[in-house]
Structures are given as C-alpha cells and as structure tokens.
C-alpha cells in the first residue's frame, strides 16, 4: 500500500484532477473515487486532500460550489474547470514520459548486467 | 488577496468555517461507511479520525495552500518578540523608552522648526515678497538691515519700479482700546496704504486704507482681525462704519480681515501709518514691503532697484548707497535662526546618540545569541527565516516605543506653543496632530532601521560561519561594530556637553553682570500713553504728578517714580551733538521723574541727580551715566559740559553723573543682549508736550514703586491708585523688576537648561552603552580569564586590562568629540558672551566629566573579574 507521502510530489494533484474529470464531487467523493480507481492499492492520508483541493481551487484549476449531498447535507462540490482539463492532459503526458524514462533506465541496467 | 485588510479578515474567517464544515462532513461520511462495514460506532469514529490524519498538519498545510504562510510566520515572530520583551523587562523598557524619547524630541524639533523657520509664509506666492532697504555696494552685496526712513520711502515710491509696494511699521505696539465699559490693552500695527494688497490678502469685508487717507493728519481709521471682531465686538454684523475708541480717540472701522490671517507682529488691529519724512520718519523706523510681479526674477528686480537713485540724505553717506532687496521670509526668520538652530541641532545629536544606542544594544543581544542561530541553521532554517525574525523583533519593540513617543508628542506640542512664541518669536501655529503623528511614524521607521540593521547583517553573515564547539574559550572577541558605534556616540555626546557647557557659562555671565541698581521688591506697572487723551499740553506731566503724589501718600509705598524705559529694556536712541562738533553721537535717552535714581538705588558719581528743582519753569538739565562720560567726554569735566539734545530741550548742561545700569541692546558694536550703554537722563517735566506725542507711539512708560517693607504685595495697591486718577488707562504690563531682569535672558536660560538636560540624557545613554560593552566582554572572556587566574595571574591586572579597553574606546570618542566641538564652536559665536567659544574651562570640564564617567562605566563592570572563582569557571566548560 502506498501512502500519500510516498507519491511523487504533484501526483496527488494529478489524481484529484483525474478523479474530477469523471464528474463533480465533494471531497469525500473524490477520495472514494481515487481509492476505487486504484483498486485499493492507494490509501491516502485523507486529510491531505483538502489542502490539495484548496491549492487547486486557488490556482483556478478546479471550481468549487456549495450544494447538497445525496443525504441532503451541505457539502462543497468541486468541478474541473476548463483550464483544469487542459492541465490534466498536460500532466498525464508528463507523467507518462517520466515513467517511460525510469522504466528504460531500470530495464537497461538489468540487460547490461 | 485584496488590499482591504478587513475584507481579507472576513474572507479568512469564512474559509476557516467552511474547512471545518467540510472536515466534519468527511468524518461523518467515513464513520457511517465504517459502521456499515460492521464496526462499533465509537470504534468507527476513532478509526475515521486516524485515517483522516493529524488535524494540526492538515490545518497548517491548508493554511499554507491558501497563502497564509507568510501571515502565520509574521504572527509567530511577533508573538516570540513580545515574549522576549516580557522576559527581559529591563531591556524592553530601555529600548522602548529610548525610542519614545527620540521620537518625541525629534517631533518637537520638527514642529518648532516648521512653525518658526521652514514653513512658507501664510500668504499667496510668498517667495515673491521682498523687503526693500539701502546698502553700500562697495562693501556688501545686499542690505543688512531693511529699515528705511520716510524720505527713502518717498524716493522709492516715486522713482522705483512699479511693483505693488507698501510702507509699514514692522513692530506692533500696545495701545488702549475702550471696549464696552472696560479698558483693554491690545496690539496695534501701523501699516500704509496697499499693505494687504501686497501681501495678497483679500479682506473679509470692507477695504484697506487709501493713499489719500494715509497721510499725516489723515482720518482715524482701523482694520480689525477676525479674532478681535469675535472676542471684543461679539461678531457684530454692522462692524463696518462703526467707530471704536482706540488710543483715546474714535477710529472708524473700514475693514475686517479673514479668519486665517496672521501678522508676524501678532497685531489685532491695524491703523494708518501716516508716513512722513520728518518726525519719526527722520529715523529708520519704517519698512517697505514689495511683491515682485510674475515673470520677473529676483535678480531682475534687484538690477532694476540698483538703478534707482537714493534719497538725498542717504546719498551724502560714504560709499555707494543703493536700493537693494531681501526676501521677506529671510527677514522674518533671521532673528530666530541661530538660537533655534542650535536647539534643533542639539536634538538631532540626541537622536543620533539614542539610535546608535539602540543599534548597540541590538547588536549585543545578537552576538549573545550566536549559538542559537548556528543551531537553527544546522536544523535547516534559511537566512530569510532568521532575518525576518530579527526584523520582527526590532520592529515590535520599535513600534511600541514609537507609539508611546507619538502620544507624548501630540500631548506636549500644544503646551510648548506659548513658550516658543515668547522665546523665539514663533508667530505661526504649530503643526496639527495629524502632521505630528506622520512625523512620529517617520522617526520610528528611522529608529527601527538604525537599530535593526546591525543584527540583520550579523545574521546574514553568520551563514558563512560554522558551529564552533570550542567557542567557550575564545581569544579576543572583536566587537568592532559596537566599538565604532560607541566612539561615535561619545563624540556626539562630547559635542552636546560642550555646547551645553558654553551656553551655561554664557548665561551665568549675563546673569551675574553688575546690574547697577537693586531690583529687590520693586514693582513696575506700564501704561500706553499713545492716546489722544494725553496729547494735550501738560496732560502727561499732570498724570505723572498726580499719580506719584497719590502713590507716595500710601503707607505701603516708600517712594515711586516714572521712567520712559526701565533697566534691562530697550531704550530710546537719540543722536546728540557736542557743541562745536559736526558729528552726531548716538546715545540712549530716558526721561525720568525726580526720585528715579533713589527708587532704583543707582549711585550718583558726581554732581546731582534729577530732582524736584527740575520743574517745567526751570532751565532744562541733563544727567549722564558713566558710560557716556567714558565714551564721549573722556578728557573733559562732565559736570557743566553742554549737549545739544534735539528733543525741543535745546542746549542743556550736564548736572550730574550716575552709575551705569544694564540696558537692552538697540545699537552699538556689541550684540550682547544687555550692556552698559551711554545714556542721558532728562526730566519729564521739562520736555515739550509734542515730544511725548511722538515718543509714546514707540515707548510706553513704566511706574516704578518701592514698598515700605518688602513683605507687602503692591499690585493691589498700585493699580487701583492709578486707576482712581486715570480710569481710562488699561494696564499694559505689570511685573516685578526682578521678573523683568530675569526675562531679559529667558531665551538664553531656556537654551542652556534644555541643552544641559539633553547632554545629561546623552551621557546616561552613552555610559550605559559603554558599561554594556565592557560587561559583555567580561562575560564572554570568563573562560580565558579563569584559566589565567588559575595559572597565577593577578585579578587586578586583568581588571586594568579589560577596563582600559573601555577607556580606550572612550578616549577615541572624546578626542573625536573635541575635534567636532572646535568645528561647532564657530556656529555658536553669536550666542555666547563673556567666554570665548573655545573656552578653556569648559573644555577642561567637559573632558573631566566624560573621563570620570567613562572610567566608571569601564571599571565597574571590569571589577566583576575579581569575583570570578577560577575553579568554578573552569568547570563550566
């Protein structure tokens, strides 16, 4: 199980954006989606979600609005903004590049050995 | 984030609440899900909290995400700073009080300087206003004095450039006003036609005097100030055209001045000058004010003036006499410039000393926290973090001091307004509280900057040093910065003490001058006789005769007399001639009633004084003083010699010689405040009435009363007695002779006292600084000294060694200070009498006082070395 502190910096932001690309959600909802999408492998320190969401909201990458949850309680709903979508695509591309590079390095070492 | 801090605060609170709400929501949902999975409710809640994570860290990360990190750090630094102050109240008190003192003093200096010296005159385009005078182009570049006589004014008016100009009397005089019922004494200024037009003042109502009215024998008119209109006439809406009883005759009010108008003479009512080339106009008793038109430069105006031929009499004088101009604001400010400048300079020195003390203290504290900084750096703190903390510490303490200083400043300024008006002739109001607070804020910023620079620099440099575990036993620690500061402080303190000492000695000299008479117990009451009711033949002498007879009949009164001017006052000056000689001699003249010299206790040196035989029917006589004889009759027998006195007395014989009394300077090569000037005394009874009419425009005579026993308060006796004979006369001034003597040097006394006080504070601060330096050195070198003493060195040598280090700093400072004092002494020349500006006694005193103080401040802390226990010190490592 990977804790949130073992993720590369900035990964948490990317995961949140991806979760929101599936549709608006409140903070708890985002958490559930990420855990579900990772098929249970990621267990984040849940509180660190909110600073990250605040950061993203501040940068204008997500928009936030207070609404009613499915059990009729007040909750803050986050939504990917237009610039957020652009950002998500860019981040995904970068991530793939980095992973491929690391993978190449690791594979090369094995074959040379 | 917007710039509105209150809106920011509200948004911050709302964001806080929302985070709490989100967190609660999250925890509730998580708990529900955990219960759904089968846990117990209490267990589920705890698990939810555990999974959520450390709320403190969540909160602080959230705050950082919102950009509150900077605010957080600031609040933290300020809290730390306040705690630091509370834990060390001595340091806190010293820092805050020193800052407050410098802010208050600096603010006061600025306020007084602004009102007296720097502020623009309260007239439109004041730099275009000039005073016209005469000067000798062969010896000077411009007029020294801008007083002119009537003929010069007429020449300028008729032949000069067509600039708006007006002639006026620059001095106010007190005159009698009959309000409804009661008689009042008010300040009058006599101005010529066009005066207010030149100043650029629009009257609130009415008009000013016309040239046709402003002639000898012209109508009695008055222009009154807004203040007088309110206070005396109750803002009467029909004031124009109304007549007021001024100087004993009805004056028609033709104009009312606006509320904000102020005259340097502080006059309340203005009457026509009626300039003439004769009478008072024969002397340089007038001033000419002119306004240079737009488009003309001062230089052009000057050149234009130089081509105007001087008046006939003036052209007869030696040299190349020409018309010249002096900017009006310079004329106004001139008298106060040096005396006030010295006080402001002294305050500036105090500020520098105070601020460098703050810097030294902060530097010392930083040095003692060296280990703390190293440790924090090792733990990862960047330079920025430490620097921000240092700045917060200095700023917190500095702001507290600054606020205290600002409050003190705003409270003190109004209280000194009357004082500076009396001593330095300040006629504009001091700046309002808003301006004072702004100046206090500026000074606080300066104080914080000076105090904070050293620690900040130290912290920035400490990044390049490492932790030194062997730091306890150190070699000589170089407190170069602190030493330099102290040398500077001592230098400035020396200059302050030197200046204060010089001024104190000068004041002492003036105070102990031989008075020539005995003021003890004498009461003086002054009345203005510039009054139509006393212009008739014999009215003045009858008044004197009746009041003196009445006074002397009272049992409380031993004797009384009247004199035109008193000792220590400025007398009338009069050119007289010795028969057969062409050159006029300038001398003072005082008219007196019989018994004058006895009342004052002035010694008669030869012949006789003025007495009752010198009546209106007898031949006129004169009495001169010793100074007159020494200066003008050195070879001759004075008694019997004759003088030509142009006062209608004709040629009078001298019948006696009296001792000198001190009189205020009006002329002469000495600029000393008082001196023993040549004087002739004449009998009031023997002067023609028309002489009184002219002279009483400028001088108001005083009654001098000697009590039968020194215990009786005379005020309640004298004034009613005189009032019963002349009820129409209001008292102009009532004062004891001792007060008049004291008042002559009031300004010098104030200066000496003030500078002495500041010198005292400066010495205290400097001594504390030196003490701190030596004490810290002793503390830091404990280890080394302990080792030395364990090895057998004597404590006395160690004490001498450390103490003399302090003395060396002090010595350098004193030497610097003496050098600076020599330079400064030049500026003090016009303020110091009776002692040379490089007075040896003062210098020796200064060096002694500072030397003793420095010795104490060095050796008292050094003596702590004797109490060191070597064994214990060694074990401390």
Image (tube, rainbow, N blue to C red):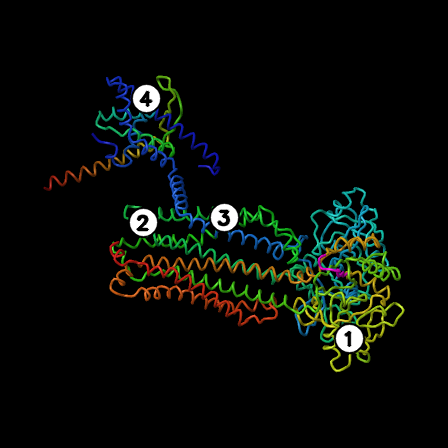
Label 3 or label 4, whichever comes before in sequence order: 4
Instruction: Classify residue B540 as left or right of residue B117.
Output: right
User: Is B706 a magenta residue?
Assistant: yes
Query: Percent x, y for residue B71?
Result: 40, 39
**Which residue position holds label 3?**
B402
Chain letter belonging to callout 4? B
Badge 1 is on which residue?
B584
Of B587 and B735, nearer the camera is B735
Q: The residue tagged with tag 2: helix, strand or loop?
A: helix
Q: Mark 3 lies on which chain?
A: B
Mark 1 or mark 4, which has the lower sequence index? 4
Element type where label 3 sits in the image: helix
* Disc 1 packing (10 Å; few <14; some 14–19; many ≥20): few
CA distance for labels 1 and 4? 112 Å
Q: Which of marks 2 and 4 is nearer the N terminus?
A: 4
Look at the image and give the residue range highlighted in magenta. B703-711
């Amino acid at each position: 199980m990977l804790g949130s502190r073992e993720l590369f910096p900035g990964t948490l932001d990317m995961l949140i954006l991806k979760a929101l690309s599936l549709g608006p959600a409140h903070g708890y909802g985002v958490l559930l989606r990420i855990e579900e999408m990772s098929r249970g492998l990621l267990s984040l320190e849940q509180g660190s979600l909110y600073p990250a969401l605040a950061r993203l909201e501040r940068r204008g990458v997500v928009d936030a609005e207070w609404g009613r949850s499915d059990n009729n309680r007040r909750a803050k709903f986050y939504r990917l903004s237009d610039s957020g979508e652009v950002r998500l695509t860019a981040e995904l591309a970068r991530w793939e590049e980095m992973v491929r590079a690391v993978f190449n390095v690791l594979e090369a070492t094995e074959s040379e050995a | 984030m917007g710039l509105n801090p209150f809106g920011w605060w509200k948004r911050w609170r709302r964001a806080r609440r929302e985070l709490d709400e989100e967190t609660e929501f999250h925890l509730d949902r998580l708990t529900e899900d955990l219960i759904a999975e089968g846990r117990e409710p209490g267990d589920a809640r705890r698990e939810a909290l555990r999974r959520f994570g450390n709320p403190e860290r969540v909160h602080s990360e959230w705050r950082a995400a919102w950009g509150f990190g900077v605010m957080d750090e600031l609040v933290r630094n300020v809290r730390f700073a306040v705690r630091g102050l509370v834990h060390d109240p001595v340091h806190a008190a010293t820092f805050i009080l020193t800052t407050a003192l410098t802010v208050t003093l600096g603010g006061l200096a600025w306020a007084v300087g602004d009102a007296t010296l720097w502020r623009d005159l309260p007239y439109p385009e004041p730099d275009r206003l000039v005073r016209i005078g005469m000067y000798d182009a062969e010896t000077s570049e411009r007029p020294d004095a801008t007083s002119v006589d009537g003929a010069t004014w007429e020449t300028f008016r008729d032949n000069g450039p067509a600039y708006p100009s007006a002639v006026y009397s620059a001095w106010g005089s007190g005159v009698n006003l009959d309000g409804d019922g009661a008689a009042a004494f008010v300040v009058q200024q006599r101005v010529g036609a066009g005066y207010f037009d030149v100043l650029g003042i629009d009257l609130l109502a009415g008009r000013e005097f016309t040239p046709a009215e402003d002639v000898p024998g012209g109508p009695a008119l008055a222009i009154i100030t807004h203040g007088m209109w309110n206070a005396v006439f109750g803002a009467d809406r029909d004031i124009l055209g109304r007549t007021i009883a001024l100087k004993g005759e009805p004056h028609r009010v033709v104009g009312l001045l606006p509320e904000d108008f102020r005259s340097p003479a502080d006059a309340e009512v203005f009457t026509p000058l009626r300039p003439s080339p004769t009478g008072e106009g024969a002397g340089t008793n007038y001033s000419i004010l002119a306004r240079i038109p737009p488009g003309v430069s001062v230089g052009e105006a000057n050149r234009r003036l130089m081509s105007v031929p001087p008046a006939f009499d003036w052209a007869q004088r030696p040299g190349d006499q020409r018309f010249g101009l002096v900017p009006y604001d310079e004329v106004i400010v001139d008298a106060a410039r040096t005396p006030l400048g010295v006080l402001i300079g002294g305050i500036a020195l105090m500020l520098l000393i105070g601020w460098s003390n703050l810097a030294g203290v902060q530097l010392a504290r930083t040095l003692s926290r060296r280990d703390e900084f190293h440790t924090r750096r090792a733990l990862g703190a960047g330079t920025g973090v430490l620097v921000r903390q240092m700045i917060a510490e200095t700023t917190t303490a500095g702001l507290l001091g600054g606020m205290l200083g600002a409050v003190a400043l705003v409270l003190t300024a109004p209280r000194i307004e009357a004082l500076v008006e009396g001593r330095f002739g300040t006629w504009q109001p001091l700046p309002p509280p808003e301006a004072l607070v702004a100046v206090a804020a500026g000074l606080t910023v300066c104080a914080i900057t000076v105090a904070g620079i050293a620690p900040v620099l130290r912290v920035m440099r400490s990044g390049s040093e490492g932790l030194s575990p062997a730091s306890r036993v150190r070699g000589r620690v170089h407190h170069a910065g602190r030493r330099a500061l102290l040398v500077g402080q001592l230098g400035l303190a020396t200059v302050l003490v030197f200046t204060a000492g010089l001024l104190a000695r000068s004041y002492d000299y003036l105070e102990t001058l031989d008075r020539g008479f005995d003021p003890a117990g004498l009461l003086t009451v002054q009345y203005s006789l510039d009054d139509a009711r006393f212009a008739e033949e014999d009215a003045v002498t009858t008044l004197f005769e009746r009041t003196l007879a009445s006074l002397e009949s009272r049992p409380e009164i031993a004797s009384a007399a009247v004199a035109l001017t008193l000792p220590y006052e400025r007398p009338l000056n009069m050119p007289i001639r010795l028969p057969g000689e062409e050159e006029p001699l300038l001398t003072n003249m005082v008219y007196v009633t019989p018994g004058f010299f006895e009342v004052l206790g002035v010694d008669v040196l030869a012949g006789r004084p003025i007495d009752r035989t010198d009546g209106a029917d007898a031949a006129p006589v004169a009495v001169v003083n010793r100074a007159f004889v020494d200066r003008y009759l050195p070879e001759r027998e004075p008694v019997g010699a004759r003088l030509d006195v142009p006062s209608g007395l004709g040629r009078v014989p001298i019948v006696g010689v009296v001792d000198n009394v001190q009189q205020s300077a009006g002329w002469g090569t000495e600029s000393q405040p008082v001196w023993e000037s040549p004087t002739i005394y004449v009998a009031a009874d023997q002067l023609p009435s028309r002489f009184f009419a002219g002279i009483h425009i400028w001088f108001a005579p005083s009654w001098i009363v000697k009590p039968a026993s020194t215990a009786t308060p005379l005020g309640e006796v004298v004034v009613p007695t005189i009032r019963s004979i002349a009820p129409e006369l209001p008292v102009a001034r009532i004062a004891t002779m001792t007060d008049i003597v004291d008042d002559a040097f009031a300004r010098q006394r104030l200066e000496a006292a003030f500078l002495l006080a500041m010198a005292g504070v400066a010495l205290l601060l400097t001594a504390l600084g030196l003490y701190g330096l030596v004490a810290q050195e002793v503390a830091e070198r404990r280890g080394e000294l302990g080792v030395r003493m364990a090895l057998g060195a004597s404590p006395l040598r160690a004490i001498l060694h450390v103490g003399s280090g302090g003395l060396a700093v002090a010595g350098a400072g004193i030497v610097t200070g003496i050098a600076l004092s020599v330079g400064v002494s030049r500026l003090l020349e016009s303020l110091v009498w009776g002692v040379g500006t490089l007075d040896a006694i003062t210098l020796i005193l200064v060096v002694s006082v500072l030397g003793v103080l420095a010795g104490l401040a060095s050796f008292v802390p050094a003596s702590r070395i004797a109490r060191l226990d070597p064994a214990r010190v060694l074990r401390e490592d």
